[in-house]
Image (tube, helix red, strand yellow):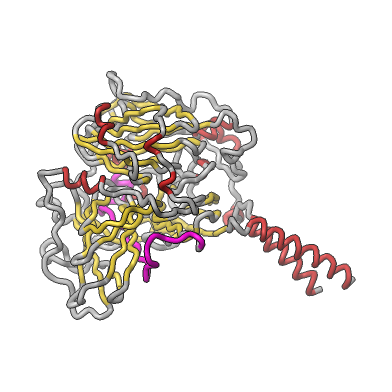
Amino acid sequence: MAVLGTTAAFWLIHIAILFSLSFAADPFAFFDFEVSYTTASPLGVPQQVIAVNNKFPGPVINVTTNYNVVLNVRNKLDEDLLITWPGIQMRRSSWQDGVLGTNCPIPSKWNWTYQFQVKDQIGSFFYYPSLNLQRAAGGFGPFIVTNRDIIPIPFAMPDGDIVLMIGDWYTQNHTALREALDNGKQLGMPDGVIINGKGPYRYNNTLVPDGIDYETINVDPGKTYRVRVHNVGVSTCLNFRIQSHNLLLAETEGYYTSQQNYTSMDIHVGQSFSFLVTMDQNASSDYYIVASARFVNQTVWQRVTGVAILHYSNSKGKASGPLPDPPNDVYDSSYALNQAMSIRQNVTASGARPNPQGSFHYGQINVTDTYILRSVPPVTIEGKLRATYNGISFVKPETPFRLADAFNVKGAYKLDFPSQPLDRPPKMDRSIINATYKGFIEIILQNNDTVAQSFHLDGYSFFVVGMGSGNWTENSRGSYNRWDAISRSTVQVFAGGWTAVLVSLDNVGIWNLRSENLDRWYLGQETYMRIVNPEDAGNKTELPVPDNVLYCGALAKFQKPQKASSATTIHVGSKAYLTLLVVFFAMIYILC
């Protein structure tokens, strides 16, 4: 019996080693999220917010590039939930994107497990709930993807990491904001700006009431920190600055930038930046960290300012005096535009892979299609206030589009989204773009709205090649940056202006293209790109429907009730988990 046990153990251990060697390059990282309501007072007023694992903001997801992320979400809200991961390019797997066009929502009291790979990515991102204005109540948190050890970073290793989540904030909960939009009202001026879920330090006794909890960032003199800043707000661009400190820009949304010093940076809704900040001051007092509203009437919006404290370990006193000034360009938008276009790609740095990012000469590739997406102020369509792209206000899908394709559901959407604005009355529809796999497309974002917009594309990064004021024309291509334009997934479009991006369509799936301004997104300013490889017969360019897929809409009849015990079940095709099982049984044999 002992000989048989030893032999079995010998083979089991060898199998385990084979498993480990086979899958060592693609480790798994496991997370559990419980999304629920809690009470907080970001601006001194108790209100209902959305917490993740009882934290507001939610916990950090920190993984290394190429890791497989397995994240089980328990929905303890009283409404449907989806979590999305902007900027995380889920290669071959739009099934995990976490928006209504790709996933059925997770019903209240249910759980669902996301599984995706952060393939060939590095950088600073964040996650948030994508449905029904829920992000306006919280549910967001940082998502950090680090380099593998064999890939150098293009700067000295920082002494520490600091995450700042900034955003405009309303003391009304998201359901009240939603009701206001449903009733044809605008959201109006926010009640303040929060930093890491906390309100402003009392820098002014008139503007800031007493008793508000504020964020303090503790640092040591002489050290350099990587400061990751995310605008997770509703609709307001914020100018970020740290009193008496330079911001050395190093990375944005997964791509290393040409390193330049800024005294402040405009961060639009949905955008993420990494700065290297050296603590080189004499610490005679603490310093202000400021996030203030941009492109608004500063006199009226004085109360909408977020202020945190940078505290040196040898600080001799509290911060005092006026806040550091924002850019003085109220009557000149060229400053903000020039700053945006000054952000360039570091073409000599390696990204997630050993080869330099600059080896992709996007400026020499022929454009296969051009799409001009025009946004205008919200209009009334069928008696409802709606926002549009090219005169189409998107109607939320009942059946996710890729799921409808897989099960041959007819009429779930139309492949007739216009490639340019048409001279016709606006309408509500489920019209999406029929894009070409491996195409190289130009998207012109024409903002004829009265507010600055943020534009986002799931599943991809794009090259930000041009911006300008007025209306885009074909002559505008002469101003494009065709060498070192930054790649990112969220870009601003100034009111009364345009932004041009180039995208290589190499990621099969159906991907959401939207305004990151929550009010405009909720009112229908979005569409999808459908990208199908007609030659894919073996799931080489797109993964199959996941085993744990949820069904809804026309396919609701296939959905089985979720058992209470399934909340603790993680749906994993996990090689690491199989390895552990094999090792476990091998050890049992050895011990026997």
| Left or right: where 224 falls relative to 439 | left
Q: Is residue 375 visible?
A: no
Residue drawn 58% across and 27% down?
408
| Left or right: where 261 falls relative to 50 | left
Q: Is residue 353 above or below residue 287?
A: above
Q: Quadrant of residue 241?
A: bottom left
Residue drawn 45% across and 59% down?
146
Q: Is residue 500 magenta?
A: no
Residue 269 in picture, x, y percent from top left: 29, 48
Q: Is residue 532 above or below residue 350?
A: above
The magenta region covers 150-177
Q: Is residue 307 visible?
A: yes
Residue toward you, 175 or 412: 412
Residue drawn 49% across and 28% down?
412
Residue drawn 20% across and 59% down?
263
Residue toward you, 484 or 545: 484
Residue 476 in picture, x, y percent from top left: 25, 31
Q: Is residue 165 magenta?
A: yes
Residue toward you, 46 or 369: 369
| Left or right: where 324 falls relative to 446 | left
Residue 238 in picture, x, y percent from top left: 23, 52
The image shows a total of numbered marks equal to 0
Residue 48 in picture, x, y percent from top left: 33, 56
| Left or right: where 165 falls relative to 17 | left
